[in-house]
Amino acid sequence: GNQEVFEVSELPISVGEYLRSRFLEHLEQQSNTADMVKIKWAIYDWYWRFEVIDNSCYSLDELSFKSYEEFEECPGVWNINLRHGFSSVINSLLEHIPEANIQYNKAVKRIYWDNSAIPAHTKMPRSSISNSQETIWESIPFIECEDGEIMSCRHLLLTMSAGYLKRHLDDMFHPELPKEKCQALRGIGFGTINKIFLIFEQPFWEPGTEGFQLIWLEGESVDTTKPDWWVRGISGFDLVYDNPNVLVGWIGGKAAEHMESLDDSEVLDACVSVLSKFLNREIPTPVSIVRSYWFTNPYIVGSYSNKQLPYDTSDALLETFYEPLMADAPLHRVSKVEWPLVLFAGEATDKDFYSTVHGAMRSGFREADRLINFWSRKRDDIILESSQAQPKL
């Protein structure tokens, strides 16, 4: 179809408002029978559910249309199926990092990012990471782990999910994050989508089938008092590459969160029931079910980020969110330098590729470059200051 280009000042309030207004406009321009209008509303309802899942949000009415204009598709092959799963990507990144530099199962309880702003009675004894003059003695960031261990560092790079950050915003940082950074975080949403894998003994579908999309003709309303209300959050079941006996169901929003609270047998029975209803025949019971639990994972609290309506209020909101927490630090003898104490990365901080793995990786490269540039400038400044301090003959 035709691609519409908007000026920022012309953008509708939300994605939901735009889609709804254009769909109603379409209906007004058409002379459809009542049955055809019902079918079109059902397809519209399916597309709404699909977009809720794709954007990991709870409603398109809370989603920024401006972010739709900014999001970019990653060039190259769209679907890359990794032979050994995503762990192979992590393993390749770990190849050149000494094993001793990585600690596992070290949950962080609290981040002390500006020691000079912490009351004396709350300060804890700790050892410095360095005896050099380059250490920021009073403002060096340090973390308190759940097991009580204290770790200090020159720089702290945070890559936790936006969902985890939003949930722990009030109790993780000491002192609290600056007000403008907390306000910027309001423009970042973080919803839940999940996958439900149904594994059958053999395919019950015909060769060439591409999957089953669920288009409900009963209308938009969902009766949450019914036990299986959450199946209305499923957009459909797709085939799985290189797994000919498997279907994967996609589910989003509050329905995805509720699904996580159910037993495997309840989810399996509900999925079989809805597939049988749409195919108008009995289907075999899957031999097993595998599903994700992104919302109840305490260190993720959802799936990936989206941009909320407050995002439209400022062109610099995202930069405010991920700009480092800085401190004035003594440089060598006399000068001072703006020292990046705490840096922020993760998919939610990437303007173009948020919600994606490549966006997360690119944000890490961005902050690594920031530190490389900082230390390069700092070294040059020390050399310059030292040369100026030499006595002239």
Image (cartoon, helix red, strand yellow):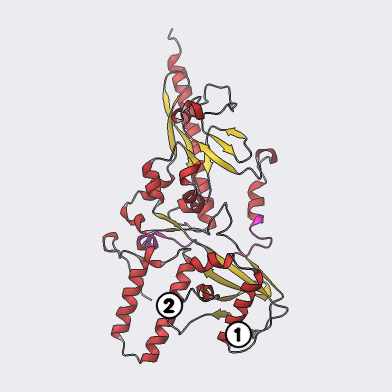
Q: Considering the image in quadrants, where does the N terminus appear?
A: bottom left
Q: CA distance from mark 1 to mark 2?
A: 22 Å
Name above or below for residue 127 compared with residue 53: above
Structural crowding at the residue carrying mark 1, measured as other residues with C-alpha within 10 Å and reported as few (<14), some (14–19) or many (≥20): some
Residue located at (52% from left, 38% from top): 111
Where is residue 30 drawn, in percent x and y? 31, 87
Determine which quarter of the picture holds residue 51.
Answer: bottom left
Where is residue 267 drawn, in percent x and y? 61, 72
Q: Amino acid at mark 1?
A: Ser
Q: Amino acid at mark 2?
A: Ser
Structural crowding at the residue carrying mark 2, measured as other residues with C-alpha within 10 Å and reported as few (<14), some (14–19) or many (≥20): few
Residue that label 1 marks: 276
Q: Earlier in the sequence, mark 1 or mark 2?
A: 2
Where is residue 374 drawn, in percent x and y? 47, 34
- Magenta-drawn segment: 66-88
Judge whether residue 70 is colored magenta: yes
Q: Considering the image in quadrants, where does the C terminus appear?
A: top left
Label placed on residue 221 = 2
Query: Horizontally, is 35 left or right of 262 in the view?
Result: left
Judge whether residue 368 is colored magenta: no
* Residue 78 visible, this orientation: no
Please tell me which residue lies in front, 376 or 336: 336
SS majority, magenta: loop
Residue located at (42% from left, 9% from top): 392
Please tell me which residue lies in front, 142 or 101: 142
Determine which quarter of the picture holds residue 198.
Answer: bottom right
Residue located at (63% from left, 71% from top): 197
Local secondary structure at mark 2: loop
Residue located at (69% from left, 38% from top): 100
